[in-house]
Amino acid sequence: MGKGKTAYIGRSYLGRTVVSGVSFDSGDLVAEIKGEVVFDPDYGSDYCMDLGVGCVLEPDPPFRYLNHSCEPNCELLICDDEDQAVPLRLCLFATQKIQPGDELTIDYAWAADSAIPCQCGSRACRGWIVAATELSSFERSKSVA
Ligand SMILES: [Zn+2]
């Protein structure tokens, strides 16, 4: 299933997920995330990805279904490309070796006020989908509440 494709939509216990169809080494570009760029600082959706500078990307499948992990194997980076009509491009890079059939995951690194319980199941799970840098202040605010 999905053979020959870079990535395809799979199933995890959380619902839809993105599965790699090929192998990658750490640092490899997995894909450029295509989709609709929305220039509206108030816009929000379940799948949108922040591009900074007041705009977000509403990604096309399969990458709109990237799941969070506290031990991700990919990261999203904004690539600056002045030759393009839309200079900001969102690119997915492998941060470790990936085999065909592996689930592709990123660290959502959400702000503390957006945090929800995490079920990623990794050994390093922080318990919440929240940025590692926000975790200590977030846990303090939880224990007070
Ligand atoms: Zn987790």
Image: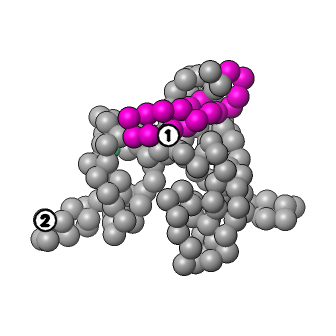
Distance, label 2 to label 1, CA atoms, is: 33 Å
Quick check: is the Cβ at mark 1 less than 8 Å away from ligand 1?
Answer: no
Indicate whether residue 117 is drawn in magenta.
no
Q: Which kind of residue does numbered mark 1 sit on? A: Arg
Q: Which kind of residue does numbered mark 2 sit on? A: Ser
Is 103 positioned to the left or the right of 36 in the image?
left
Q: Which residue lies furthest to the left in this view?
A: 144
The quarter of the picture where residue 59 lies is bottom right
Q: Which colour scheme is used?
A: one colour
Q: Do the residues labelled 2 and 1 touch (CB within 8 Å)?
A: no
Let me know if residue 95 appears in the view. Answer: no
Residue drawn at x 43%, y 56% is 109
* Horizontal and vertical percent position of residue 97: 55, 27
Assess disc 1: are there few (<14), some (14-19) or many (≥20) residues with their C-alpha within 10 Å of its C-alpha. Answer: some
* Above or below: residue 56 compared with residue 35: below
Viewer-proximal residue among 135 and 21? 21
Quadrant location of the N terminus? Answer: top right
Residue matched to label 2? 143
Residue drawn at x 26%, y 48% is 127
Viewer-proximal residue among 77 and 47? 47
* Horizontal and vertical percent position of residue 27: 62, 37
Indicate whether residue 16 is drawn in magenta.
yes
Is 34 positioned to the left or the right of 127 in the image?
right
Q: Is the magenta stretch mostly helix, strand or loop?
A: strand
* Above or below: residue 66 compared with residue 96: below
Residue matched to label 1? 16
Residue drawn at x 31%, y 43% is 119
* Above or below: residue 1 compared with residue 80: above
Assess disc 2: are there few (<14), some (14-19) or many (≥20) residues with their C-alpha within 10 Å of its C-alpha. Answer: few
In the image, the segment drawn in magenta is 3-20
Residue drawn at x 66%, y 38% is 30
Quadrant location of the C terminus? Answer: bottom left
